[in-house]
Image (cartoon, helix red, strand yellow):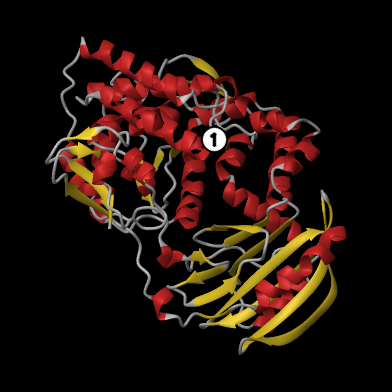
Amino acid sequence: MERYPVPTLASPASLIRHRAVTWLALVLMVLTVTGCAVSKSPITGNKRAYGYSWEQEKQLGREADPQIVAQYGELDDAALTAYVRAVGERVLAESHLRRETTDPEFRDVEFTFRVLDSPVVNAFALPGGFVYVTRGLLSHLNNEAQLAVVLGHEITHVAGRHASKRAAKAQFAQIGLIGGAILGQAVYGGSAAENILGVGSGAAQLLLLKYGRDDERESDQYGVEYSALAGYQAGEGAAFFTSLRRIQEEAGATIPTWQSSHPDPGQREQYILQSAAEWAEQVTMNRIDEEEFLREIDGIVMGENPREGFVENSMFYHPELRFQFPVPSGFGLQNGRSQVAMFDQNQQAIMIFTFAQDATSAQQAATEFGQQEGVQVRDSGSQRVNGHQSSYVVADATTEQGVLRLRATFIEFGGSVYYFLGYTAQANFDTFDNRFRETMQGFDDLTDRSKLNVEPSRLRLVRASRTATFRELVPSNLPEQFSATDLAIINQVELDDTIQRGRTLKMPR
């Protein structure tokens, strides 16, 4: 979590919706249908119905981009960002969006390429020309050719107008159901989607998919084509999809191919190799650029960055903002740039920690919170929390899913007002309130130098000192968050593969 503005002091129902929108902005954006527009496809030139006009798609991207940056943060590395942008523009130049036969309204669209400061291995695109890759994804690539295929895939989502196609197919009834499921997941976790939709979890997941499988296959197809035309050895992209498959297997996250919006990574590997081989018969594809790519990512943060918050022994520490608080027993934690979210493992309660952006005091924030429409205050007061002025509100709020009871605590700290918001169904409040209060009243200054001085692991390039198996070359003193298997996946090798002396490897330091 970092000091990014977030909407504050909304009614509990709208606040919950804001969190859901923040986490699932792309899904909501895709499904917000205001009408259908008959327009051309930049790829085929054929007309069809889209959920938005091309101008609306560009506007959607411009509006959502700041939210994405606020949620995930942009990597503070101008050189690496410029490098990714240059590769993206090189691939974009070969896409349908830059061809002479394409209508000028499509050809003139400007693209924005961003590197997000997230450890998650991910890339995605917004309508209108916004493409994002995470530092987690970059650390799992081995060369520029792989990056080119990934960027080509995301460029195709924009050129294919896939989000707009999905919106045109959606029905208003489905939108209402999915919106309810998203809200339910924000409050209660995944089981609420089943309750609200009245279907099993499999159907709920299918309704929440972002793109269809045909869209993903099309993006794979043209991702290979665009990168091949740019001179890249597009077959290199298959190795990255092998890494995705291994990450899924390591996390126990494999799912049947028919049930996934993305084709199974194993199938994608074969398709990319086959498609690249066909393009090799037509164009010269000799650009891999491994050394240049590795130099660009040398030194980036690997995994979670503890400077932005970490959990140790059930305590959340934030070295940059110099505070700490206990994590409730039985709760998981997700740390974001604008908030920390804690979820009951049985999906019955949630607690959010963030900033009260416009508040000048805890008392003011608590008063304004309690005066909102739809909030029925049951108890309120002021107290000291480990020497810091604090105010609290216990209230009920009626939502579409029933009555919630919540506890909000506002704390003055470091010139800002922070607040905790814990909520659950009214009937469950007594079960969770002690845990809410223990966390809120456990907020304190962080003074432990070992926590204040913690530093992230960074990627370093090393040369294999001898010919040996990768397992034998893994350092014995790895940072706690990495295993030998993790590093094998990052390097796109197996643990028992023989590594030749002098080969460049990616290791944490």
Residue 479: percent from the left, percent from the top? 36, 58
Report the amino acid beneath label 1: Ala
Determine the secondary structure under disc 1. loop
Residue 379: percent from the left, percent from the top? 84, 77
Q: Badge 1: few (under 14), some or many (20 or more) residues near its Cα, within 10 Å?
A: few
Q: Quadrant of the C terminus?
A: bottom left
**250 sits left or right of 190 in the view:** left
Q: Is residue 128 visible?
A: yes
**Which one is nearer the viewer's eye here, 130 or 277?**
277
Q: Which residue is mark 1?
A: 253
Q: Is residue 397 visible?
A: no
Q: Residue at x 63, y 24 (%)?
A: 169
**Which one is nearer the viewer's eye here, 131 or 459?**
459
**490 sits left or right of 42 in the view:** left
> Relative to residue 108, is residue 331 depicted above or below?
below
Residue 186: percent from the left, percent from the top? 68, 50
**64 sits left or right of 129 in the view:** right
Q: Residue at x 18, y 49 (%)?
A: 462
> Relative to residue 88, is residue 270 depicted above or below?
above
Q: Residue at x 58, y 51 (%)?
A: 22
> Relative to residue 439, is residue 119 depicted above or below?
above
